[in-house]
Amino acid sequence: MSQKEKSEVLDYDQQIAERSNVKVRSPEKVKKALKFWLKTTDFTRHRAQQFALEGESGIGKTAVVRQVCKDPEVDRYLIEFRVSNADEGQMNGYPMPGDGRIELAMVKQFKDKIDEAERLGKKILVNFDELNRSKPAMIKTVFNIIDEKIWAGVQMPMDTAFLVCINPPSEIHNVMDIFGQEAALNSRFRIMGMRPDINDFLAYAEKQPKFHWLVREYIKNNPKKLLDYQSMYSGKKYFCPAVWENVACMVAEAEEMGYAVHKIRNFPEFTDNIHAAGGTPQGSELISFMTDMHRHITPSVILEDYEKIRSTIKEGKSLTDQDEELDVGHLTVIAGRVAEYVGAMKIDFATETTQCENLAAFMSDLPDEPLMMFVRTLGTSLGDERGEYMPKMTEELKKHDSYLQTADRLLNAQRKGFDAFGKG
């Protein structure tokens, strides 16, 4: 991840932290926090704290809430209501004939859900989604429902829990525009920010049967692409976790229908849908990756199976055409990609010993210029964390003989004026 892109991520975290005075956490940590809240809060107590979750559209807030409710330790009946799409009639119900009298349709639908939860013996969690995109009158209605636990005259169980999902300050209302106006409301909610985490997402993708492996491999080797902050902030179409999952499932379905994924460029209807899903620039990158996957020397291959392509690096030959030279420029690009990958994944080389051994061998095979590029790019990618991460990584690398000569080369390079830690 470049310094600019890393600063964009940090700016996003700081926007939430500074404006809202809350922590920003990965989806996995948010799940743990929600479980703890649901398990340790007595919701029958007057004004028990509810929960507000802030994060960009499409990063998985709703998915996290659903997963928590399905967890056997929690096992809550989830009722979802998208406030941004609702008007007062939808919130309070529309009149309709029923059993010889007039009933309110929305209220009846909601009461049926309460009855079903009671039959199943489950406590309820209500998720009011996209609260900050709704009208002020609707926001006030939601807070009244949460406060009184009465929805249009329907009494809800006293142990009902409420969660509201909110988009970041860049969209319509800042979270504190909603909660900060009244001290009583602010004290009634626990507020947490959420942003995507590459390791969490890859672990999730591994478990999904319809998540095509090529899309997963692209994200794995380009972790900064998980959420395209630059396009998002500029108001353009962008890829985010929800879009990636949709595209991965589309590719899997297309392959099952007989489409040859490596010949994707031959099918405009295929490529057009990828561009339509997440935008042209990144869609084009994904298409190129899937088409030319066999030609790429990816960071994951270098770290997980380096012997497979070691001769390619050492002899400077192309993977596909042995007459084509793999020059220092190519190796410098590859070294930069590996550094970005290591920096984004924060690989623990103390436990990932095979990856550590492969990295040591890879570094020893690099000419001086790509080697310097690797270390500088890693330092930049790590940012403020480099002072803690890089010494630990170096200690693990020193356990492998192949790194010893590399350490001497790095030292000599520093003496010649290179800054191996990217500080200047």
Image: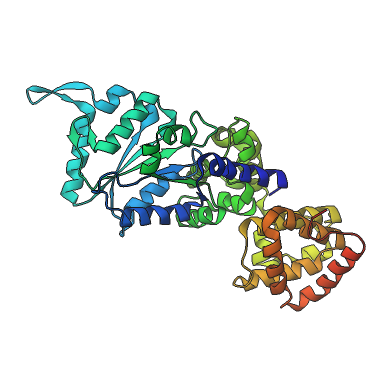
Task: Please identify the residue farthest to the right as the structure is shown.
Answer: 416
Location of residue 364 by image quarter = bottom right
Q: Is residue 133 above or below residue 370?
A: above
Q: Residue 18 at x, y = what percent?
A: 56, 42
How are the colours assigned in the image? rainbow
**Left or right: residue 100 compared with residue 228:** left
Q: Residue at x 67, y 45 (%)?
A: 7
User: Dividing the picture into quarters, in which one does residue 311 lie?
Assistant: bottom right
Image location of residue 422, percent across then percent down? 79, 56
Please count the marks in the image: 0
> Residue extending furthest left?
100
The answer to whether 72 is drawn above or below residue 289 in the figure is below
In this picture, is 245 found above or below 72?
Answer: above
- Relative to 419, is 203 on the left or the right? left
Give whichever of 182, 423 is nearer the camera. Answer: 182
Residue 65 can be seen, yes or no: yes
Q: Residue at x 72, y 54 (%)?
A: 337
**Left or right, residue 110 beside residue 162:** left
Provide residue 172's location: percent of width, then percent of height.
Answer: 50, 28
Residue 276 horizontal/vertical position (percent): 56, 32
Q: Is residue 104 left or right of residue 354?
A: left
Q: Residue at x 40, y 34 (%)?
A: 182
For this rendering, which residue is in front, 218 or 420? Answer: 420
Q: Is residue 320 visible?
A: no
| Residue that sits furthest to the front in the current view | 183
